[in-house]
C-alpha cells in the first residue's frame, strides 16, 4: 500500500499543477470579451473574474462524478488499476495543456480529460483482458460507452450551437442597435439589460443550483419550482433599473452588463471545468480510502465509486483560490487570451496567422454564397440591412488606459451572455462540454456577424480559426494515445515509470517555460512597434523614426554575424542567422503599417508635405529584401558545401561589412537618440563604400580571368557586394527623409 499512498501524494501534487496549467488555458474563456472591449482597467476585470471563480467552484460538486464513473465502469476495476489510470491521465494532461499554452493556442481541458480517461481506461482494460485470457470484444463492458459518446457528441454539438447562436444573436443585436449603438440604448437599453441579466440569472442560479455543494435539496427544489417567477422578476427589475440609468444618467449600461457577464462566465467555467483539474485526483483519493477500509485493499472492486458523493466545499474553495492566484500571476494566460482577441478584433492590422489553400478556398466559397444570396433578397431590404450593418459607423474611443478596444461593448455583451448560457445549461445537465470551444466559437460567430473578417483579413482569420480547431482534434488524438502509453508504462514498471514520467514532465515544463519566455520577449518588441494606440501625429512620427532606428540596428547586427559566419564557413552560424529574416521582415511590415497609420493621422496636411513619409516604405522594403538576400545566399552556398572565400576576398568583404554595418549603426543611433542627422558624414561613408565596390569589382574580374575564383563563389561574392550597395543607398534615402523632418522642426 505504500506505493499507492505515494501515488495519492503524487496525484494531489499533480492536481495543483493541473489547476495552474488549466486556468492558464481557460482564462481566455471569460476574459476575452472584457479585455477585448477594454470595459474597465485590467485589475478591475481580474477582480470580478476572481470572484466569479470562487463562486463557481461551489457549483461544481455534481460534475465530479464524471471522473469517477463518466467514462468507465469502476466496478470492473480494483484500486491499483484505477490509480494507474488516474496517474496516466494527470501526467498527460499537464504536459498537453502546458504545450498548448506555450504556443498561445486555446484548447479544451474537457476534451483532453475525457480522452485521457478513455485512453488510460482502454489500456488497463486491454491488459486485464489479455492477462485473464478473455476476448477483447468484451472491452465495451469496461468502458461506459453510452456516457462517453454522450459527452463527446455534446461537445461537438456545442460547437455548432455556439457558433450558430453567436452569429444569429449578434446579427439581431446589430440590426437593432447598429454600430452606432449609443443612440439606440436610450430606447432599447432597458430591454437588452433586463433580458441579458435574466438569462444569466436563469442559467447560473436556477440551472446550476442542483450542482452546488452547500444548498439543501429543499432549497434546490424551491428554486426549480419557482424558476419562471425568478426569471420574470429579474427581467422586470433589471429592465426598469437599466432603463432609468439610460434615461437619467450618462452611464453606459453595457459596461455593467459585460462585467456581470464576465463574473457569470467565470462562475460557469469554474462550475463546469473544475472537474477537469481536481476530479481525477479526488476520485483517486476516494478509491484509496474505500480500499483501505476493506480486508483486501488491492483486490476489492470499486463498486462504491458508483454512488453519489458530495465534495467538501472547503476543498473546492482551496482549488478556487489556487485558480485565482494563477489567473493573476500567469503570463501564459495573457498569451492565450491574445490569440482569441486578435482573431476577433474589428480593425485591420498585422495578422498573427498567414493564409492557406483551405482558408482561401473557404473565403472564395463564402463570397460566392453571399453573392448568390444577395441576388435573392429584394434591393430595398438589402439596402436597409446594409445601412443597419454598416461597419463604417464603428468607432471606439480609447479606454481608461489609453489603448484602443479590439471590439465594442455590444459584441462583448453578446459573447458573454450566449457563452454563459450554453455552458451553464450543460453544467446543469452534468455534461462537461468544452468552455473553450463554446466561448471561442461564440466569439468567432459574433465577429463574423460584425463583418470583422473583411477582404483584408478574412483569409488570415480563417487560417487562425482552422489552426485552433485542428488543434482541438489533435488534442483528442494525442490525449488518448499518450495516456494509453503512460498507463501501460505505469502498469508494467510501477515506481520506475512514475519517477521517470515525473522527470519527463518537469523537463518539458522547464523547456516550454524558457521557450515561452523567448517568444514573449519577441512579442513585446513587436508590440512596442505598434502605433495603434497613438492619436497624435507628431508622437506617431517620432515613434516611427525611433522604431526605424531599432530596425536598422537589428539589420546591422545580423549582417555582421552573417559575414563573420560566411568567412569561417560556419554552417550552424549561418543557419542561426536565417531565423533573423522572418523577424526583420515582420518588423519591416509593422513599420510600413505604422507609416500608413501616420499618414492617416496627417490627413489634414497637404499631400506634398506627407509624401516624404510615404517614401520610407520603399526604403524599408528595399533594406529588408537586401538583408534577406544576403543571408539566404550565404546560407545556401555553404549549406551545399561550396568553396569558401580566399583570404583576399575575405579582407575585401570584411571592409565592405565594416562600412555597411557602421553606416547602419550610426544612422540607428541618430534616430533612436533624436540626434541631428550628420548627413555629410553619412554621405561621405556611402561614397567611400561605392569607391571600394568599384575597386573590388576590378579585382574580382581579374581573379575570374585568372581562374582563381569558381562560378558559384563569384555569384555569392557579387551578391554580397550588390546587396550591400543597395542597403547603403536605401539607408541614405531614409536619411534624406529624416533630414527634411528635422529641418522642418
Image (tube, grey):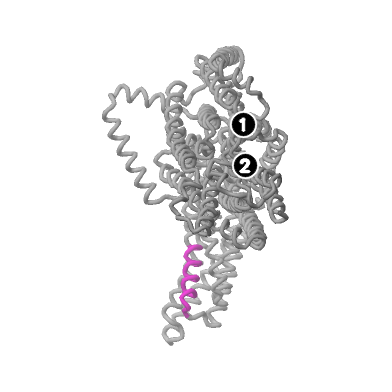
- In magenta, the rendered stretch is 626-642
Q: What is the x, y in percent for residue 85?
A: 59, 51
Looking at the picture, how far across and down is residue 21, in whole percent? Answer: 63, 47
- Viewer-nearest residue: 86 or 258: 86
Taking the view exactly as shown, the residue that stands out farthest to the front is 295
Q: CA distance from mark 2 to mark 1?
A: 17 Å
Of 303 and 17, which appears nearest the observer? 303
In the displayed structure image, the side of residue 24 where residue 392 appears, left or right: left
Residue at the far bottom in the pictured view: 706
Which disc number belongs to residue 514? Answer: none
Q: Residues within 10 Å of mark 2 (few under 14, many from 20)?
A: many
What secondary structure is found at the residue carrying circle 1?
Answer: helix
Task: Tell me which label, 2 or 1, sits earlier in the chain.
Answer: 1
Q: Is residue 304 left or right of residue 173?
A: right
The answer to whether residue 68 is above or below residue 672 is: above
* SS majority, magenta: helix
Instruction: Give the quarter of the figure containing the N terminus.
Output: bottom right
Residue at point 44%, 36% (across, down): 157
**Whole-percent x, y for residue 694 in the image:** 48, 74
Q: Does the magenta portion include 621?
A: no
Q: Residue at 47% across / 69% down in the picture? A: 633
| Residue drawn at (60%, 14%) of the image | 241
Q: Kindly indicate the quadrant of the structure image that contains residue 376.
A: top left
Give the structural element (helix, strand or loop) at label 2.
helix
Mark 1 — residue?
267
Tell me the tag on residue 279.
2
Q: Could one spot residue 394 in this view of the protein? A: yes
Amino acid at each position: 500500500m505504500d506505493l499507492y499512498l505515494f501515488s495519492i501524494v503524487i496525484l494531489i501534487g499533480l492536481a495543483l499543477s493541473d489547476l495552474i496549467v488549466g486556468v492558464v488555458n481557460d482564462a481566455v474563456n471569460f476574459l476575452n470579451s472584457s479585455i477585448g472591449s477594454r470595459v474597465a482597467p485590467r485589475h478591475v476585470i481580474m477582480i470580478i473574474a476572481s470572484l466569479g471563480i470562487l463562486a463557481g467552484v461551489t457549483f461544481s460538486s455534481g460534475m465530479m462524478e464524471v471522473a469517477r464513473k463518466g467514462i468507465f465502469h469502476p466496478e470492473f476495476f480494483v484500486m491499483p488499476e484505477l490509480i494507474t489510470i488516474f496517474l496516466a491521465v494527470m501526467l498527460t494532461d499537464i504536459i498537453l495543456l502546458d504545450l498548448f499554452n506555450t504556443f498561445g493556442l486555446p484548447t479544451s481541458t474537457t476534451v483532453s480529460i475525457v480522452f485521457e480517461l478513455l485512453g488510460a481506461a482502454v489500456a488497463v482494460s486491454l491488459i486485464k483482458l489479455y492477462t485473464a485470457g478473455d476476448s477483447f470484444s468484451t472491452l465495451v463492458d469496461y468502458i461506459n460507452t453510452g456516457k462517453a459518446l454522450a459527452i463527446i457528441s455534446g461537445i461537438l454539438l456545442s460547437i455548432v450551437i455556439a457558433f450558430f447562436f453567436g452569429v444569429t444573436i449578434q446579427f439581431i443585436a446589430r440590426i437593432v442597435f447598429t454600430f452606432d449603438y449609443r443612440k439606440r440604448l436610450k430606447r432599447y437599453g432597458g430591454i437588452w439589460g433586463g433580458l441579458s441579466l435574466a438569462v444569466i440569472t436563469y442559467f447560473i442560479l436556477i440551472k446550476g443550483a442542483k450542482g452546488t455543494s452547500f444548498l439543501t435539496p429543499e432549497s434546490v427544489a424551491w428554486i426549480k419550482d419557482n424558476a419562471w417567477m425568478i426569471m420574470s422578476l429579474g427581467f422586470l427589475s433589471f429592465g426598469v433599473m437599466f432603463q432609468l440609468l439610460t434615461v437619467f444618467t450618462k452611464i453606459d449600461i453595457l459596461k455593467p452588463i459585460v462585467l456581470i457577464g464576465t463574473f457569470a462566465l467565470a462562475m460557469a467555467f469554474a462550475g463546469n471545468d473544475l472537474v477537469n483539474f481536481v476530479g481525477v485526483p479526488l476520485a483517486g483519493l476516494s478509491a484509496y480510502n474505500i480500499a483501505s477500509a476493506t480486508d483486501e485493499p488491492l483486490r476489492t472492486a470499486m463498486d462504491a465509486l458508483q454512488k453519489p458523493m458530495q465534495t467538501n466545499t472547503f476543498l473546492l474553495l482551496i482549488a478556487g483560490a489556487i485558480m485565482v492566484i494563477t489567473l493573476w500571476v500567469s503570463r501564459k494566460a495573457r498569451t492565450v487570451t491574445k490569440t482569441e482577441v486578435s482573431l476577433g478584433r474589428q480593425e485591420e492590422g498585422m495578422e498573427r496567422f498567414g493564409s492557406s489553400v483551405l482558408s482561401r478556398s473557404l473565403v472564395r466559397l463564402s463570397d460566392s454564397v453571399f453573392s448568390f444570396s444577395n441576388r435573392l433578397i429584394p434591393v430595398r431590404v438589402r439596402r436597409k440591412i446594409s445601412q443597419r450593418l454598416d461597419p463604417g459607423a464603428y468607432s471606439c474611443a480609447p479606454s481608461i488606459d489609453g489603448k484602443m478596444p479590439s471590439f465594442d461593448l455590444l459584441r462583448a455583451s453578446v459573447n458573454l451572455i450566449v457563452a454563459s448560457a450554453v455552458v451553464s445549461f450543460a453544467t446543469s445537465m452534468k455534461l462537461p462540454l468544452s468552455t473553450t470551444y463554446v466561448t471561442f466559437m461564440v466569439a468567432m460567430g459574433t465577429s463574423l456577424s460584425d463583418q470583422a473578417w473583411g477582404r483584408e483579413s478574412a483569409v488570415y482569420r480563417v487560417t487562425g480559426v482552422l489552426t485552433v480547431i485542428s488543434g482541438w482534434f489533435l488534442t483528442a488524438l494525442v490525449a488518448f494515445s499518450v495516456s494509453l502509453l503512460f498507463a501501460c508504462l505505469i502498469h508494467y514498471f510501477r515506481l520506475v515509470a512514475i519517477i521517470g514520467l515525473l522527470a519527463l514532465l518537469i523537463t518539458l515544463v522547464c523547456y516550454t517555460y524558457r521557450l515561452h519566455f523567448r517568444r514573449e520577449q519577441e512579442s513585446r518588441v513587436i508590440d512596442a512597434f505598434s502605433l495603434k494606440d497613438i492619436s497624435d501625429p507628431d508622437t506617431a512620427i517620432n515613434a516611427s523614426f525611433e522604431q526605424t532606428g531599432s530596425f536598422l540596428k537589428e539589420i546591422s547586427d545580423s549582417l555582421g554575424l552573417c559575414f563573420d559566419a560566411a568567412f569561417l564557413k560556419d554552417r550552424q552560424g549561418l543557419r542561426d542567422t536565417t531565423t533573423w529574416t522572418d523577424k526583420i521582415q515582420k518588423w519591416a511590415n509593422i513599420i510600413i503599417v505604422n507609416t500608413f497609420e501616420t499618414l492617416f493621422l496627417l490627413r489634414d496636411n497637404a499631400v506634398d508635405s506627407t509624401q516624404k513619409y510615404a517614401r520610407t516604405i520603399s526604403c524599408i522594403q528595399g533594406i529588408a529584401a537586401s538583408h534577406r538576400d544576403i543571408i539566404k545566399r550565404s546560407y545556401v552556398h555553404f549549406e551545399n558545401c561550396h568553396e569558401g572565400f580566399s583570404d583576399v576576398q575575405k579582407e575585401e568583404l570584411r571592409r565592405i561589412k565594416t562600412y555597411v554595418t557602421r553606416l547602419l549603426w550610426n544612422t540607428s543611433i541618430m534616430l533612436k537618440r533624436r540626434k541631428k542627422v550628420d548627413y555629410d558624414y553619412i554621405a561621405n561613408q556611402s561614397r567611400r563604400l561605392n569607391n571600394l565596390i568599384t575597386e573590388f569589382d576590378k579585382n574580382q574580374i581579374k581573379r575570374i580571368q585568372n581562374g582563381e575564383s569558381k562560378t558559384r563563389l563569384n555569384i555569392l561574392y557579387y551578391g554580397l557586394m550588390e546587396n550591400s550597395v543597395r542597403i547603403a543607398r536605401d539607408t541614405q534615402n531614409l536619411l534624406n527623409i529624416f533630414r527634411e523632418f528635422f529641418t522642418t522642426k
